[in-house]
Amino acid sequence: MSRALPSALPRSLLAEPDLFDDLPPEEHSLPTHGLSEAGRPGLPLRVAPTLAETAQRIRPTTLAVDRTLPVIEALAGLFPDGLRRGVTVGVSGAGARSMALALMARATQTGSWVAVVGTSDMGLAAAFEVGVALERLVVVNAPHPDQWASVVATFVGAVDLVLVSPGHRPSTGDARRLAARCRERGSVLVCLFPEGRSPGEGWPGRIDLQFSMGAATWSGPDASSAGPLARLRSRRVEVSVGGRGVPDDGRSDVLLLPDPTGVPARL
């Protein structure tokens, strides 16, 4: 499902038609496997017009000097200066989805657009509770593996943050080209790896920043007082992050994802 976007956005925000025009000539194209947009052999593959139009209309106007995206207060211990643009981020372990949503929240509140590609179980209510501004969120159904990299590339450079959770293992070339496009355009690519799936299994390219979700403990009503409507109230998670721009020993913190009010909080 993709959300309808306002039609009155400035046409000056048009993205160029070549998805990889910022890369060397030999890296411009992704494999098309001989398919056209109608599935006929012999014609080049092109992304569905609705996706292209969406990306064109919401392309950011952020100046190159603004090199970080803001993060919510709960993540300040992990990112004192914000999330650096142009990086590929991996998030894995229990609570990975909640962390990914938390990374989006402050950016959307301050005017950035974010896109979610291929995470079919993304809960909009949960995103809203975390603080994501839904009017700046684009959700796209999982593309066919042959089209996945082209669809993601449409949004890299058109929005500030792109969240993906591919159901297949992308090729090394696709991962490398997407990472290069992020560096050129200043977008952040967040790769979500559900619990039980390691980054090495799901992503063949380099991960600049790796979030690892450690021990997670839920709290809620005592068993003696729990009725049929009782529910878990908060989850305590140990979070560590390492990679480029992070001290050699990494950074770690203990967060509530969520706290009893439904939002991320720092212990």
Image (spheres, rainbow, N blue to C red):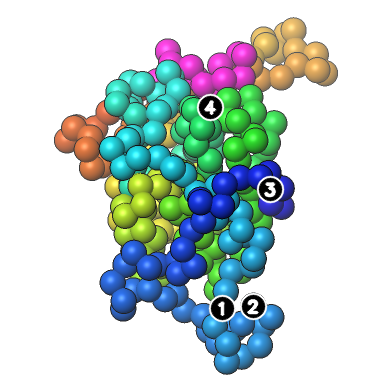
Q: Residue furthest bottom?
A: 42
Q: Are marks 1 and 4 in contact (CB under 8 Å)?
A: no
**Amino acid type shown at disc 2:** Glu
Q: Is residue 30 above or below residue 265?
A: below
Using the numbered discs, state the Cα–Cα distance from disc 4 to disc 2 in whole angstroms: 36 Å
* Residue density around tag 1, few if under 14, some if 14–19, many if 20 or more, within 10 Å: many
Q: Which residue is mark 4?
A: 109
Closer to us: mark 3 or mark 4? 3
The magenta-colored residue range is 254-267
Please give the label number shown on residue 75.
none
Q: Is residue 245 above or below residue 145?
A: above
The secondary structure that most of the magenta stretch takes on is loop
Please indicate whether residue 75 sits to the left or right of residue 140 in the image.
left
Q: Which mark is residue 7?
A: 3
- Gap in Å between the C-alphas at discs 2 and 1? 6 Å
Seen at 29% across and 47% down, the residue is 208
Q: How many marks?
A: 4
Within 10 Å of disc 4 (Cα), the crowding (few <14, some 14-19, many 20+) is some
Which residue extends farthest left?
A: 248
N-terminal label among 3 and 2: 3
- Whole-angstrom CA distance, mark 1 to mark 3, is 26 Å
Residue 253 location (% of width, % of height): 35, 22
Asked if labels 2 and 4 touch by Cβ distance under 8 angstroms, the answer is no
Q: Quadrant of the C terminus?
A: top left
**In the image, which disc is placed on residue 45?**
1
Q: Is residue 32 visible?
A: yes
Q: CA distance from mark 3 to mark 4?
A: 21 Å
Considering only order in the chain, which callout, 4 or 1, is on the residue closer to the N terminus?
1
Indicate whether residue 15 is drawn in magenta. no
- Please tell me whether residue 265 belongs to the stretch shown in magenta: yes
Of the residues tagged 1 and 3, which is closer to the observer?
3
